[in-house]
Amino acid sequence: MKIENSFWAACGVKTIDHVAVTTRNLSMVLKDYLGVPGSELLRGPGTNTSQNVDYAFVRLATGMVVEILGLKENSPITEHVENGGGAYHLCFTVTDMDHASAVAQDNGAIQVVKPREDDAFDGRRVAFFMHPDHGLFEFLDAYPKELSHGVAGYVSARASKKNKIEENIDSVQIIKQAFNKIFPELINDYDLQTAEYDVTPGWTSFKHLQLFMEIEQIAGVSFTADEIADIQSFNGLVNGLARKLEE
């Protein structure tokens, strides 16, 4: 069912990246979340100097990611923790931070924190807003800053510098070579062939782009932004590259 005039759609939201919770005891809360069957530590624990909080990310068996924010002195989460902590905000990835910020504010949101690079997200920008209906929420760049001028243009420029490889090279071997570079922990064929974006541990949006750039560098082809968004599995990459090599 198509919903007209959606606030999130107008902002260019791609997906929910994570839900954040706050606490004064990061180690205990992290242990509690890791105690949920099927959960795993995604990254951290660490300190986010740009926001003056400690953090850890846990992926639950359902695929949901929980960002645990630990209290530090003069932290922006102080008031929330003093009021009991717990669920704090949702974080949404957006393809164009400047556009998303402008639309959100045009539709009643107050910008609490202007877009800025964030330690916990490989330097991608985050921004925070307060909305009368949605409460506090966060926008996160879907792509790293080197792609901020357009994914398709960037990858096309890189690909144009590479010579076309022989058409008879097996696309499976190319994809395996790229996976071995980006995901060295996937050491057997079963793990490779069943790998999926946002399911395989570590296959985040950042790694997703690194993977495509590695494939392009090896194969001398170019994927469009839509193809990068749509192809989300090892087998999908094999089939997608095979089509490219036939062109």
Image (spheres, rainbow, N blue to C red):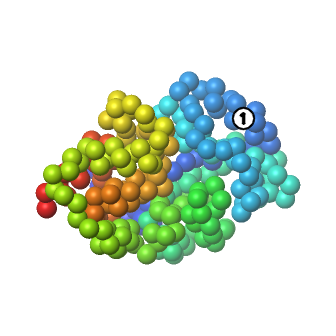
Give the farthest residue toward the left.
246
Residue 202 coordinates in the image, percent (x, y): 50, 43
Q: Residue at x 79, y 49 (%)?
A: 71
> Camera-side residue: 177 or 94?
177
Q: Residue at x 34, y 32 (%)?
A: 189
Quadrant of the image containing the C terminus = bottom left
Near mark 1 (Cα within 10 A), the count class, few <14, some 14-19 or many ≥20, is some
> Camera-side residue: 110 or 100?
100
Residue 186 coordinates in the image, percent (x, y): 44, 36
> Camera-side residue: 34 or 223?
223
Reading the image, the residue beneath label 1 is: 29
Compared to 86, does 169 lie above or below?
below
Name the image quarter holding residue 154: bottom left
Res. 122 in view: yes
On screen, residue 135 versus residue 237, left or right, reads right
Res. 129 in view: no
Q: Residue at x 64, y 32 (%)?
A: 33
Residue 215 coordinates in the image, percent (x, y): 33, 55
> Camera-side residue: 191 or 180?
180
On screen, residue 200 versus residue 77, left or right, reads left
Question: Helix, strand or loop at disc 1?
Answer: helix
Compared to 131, does 234 lie above or below?
above
Compared to 68, does 7 lie above or below?
below
Q: Residue at x 38, y 57 (%)?
A: 214
Compared to 18, does 14 lie above or below?
below
On screen, residue 64 versus residue 165, left or right, reads right
Q: Amino acid type of disc 1?
A: Val
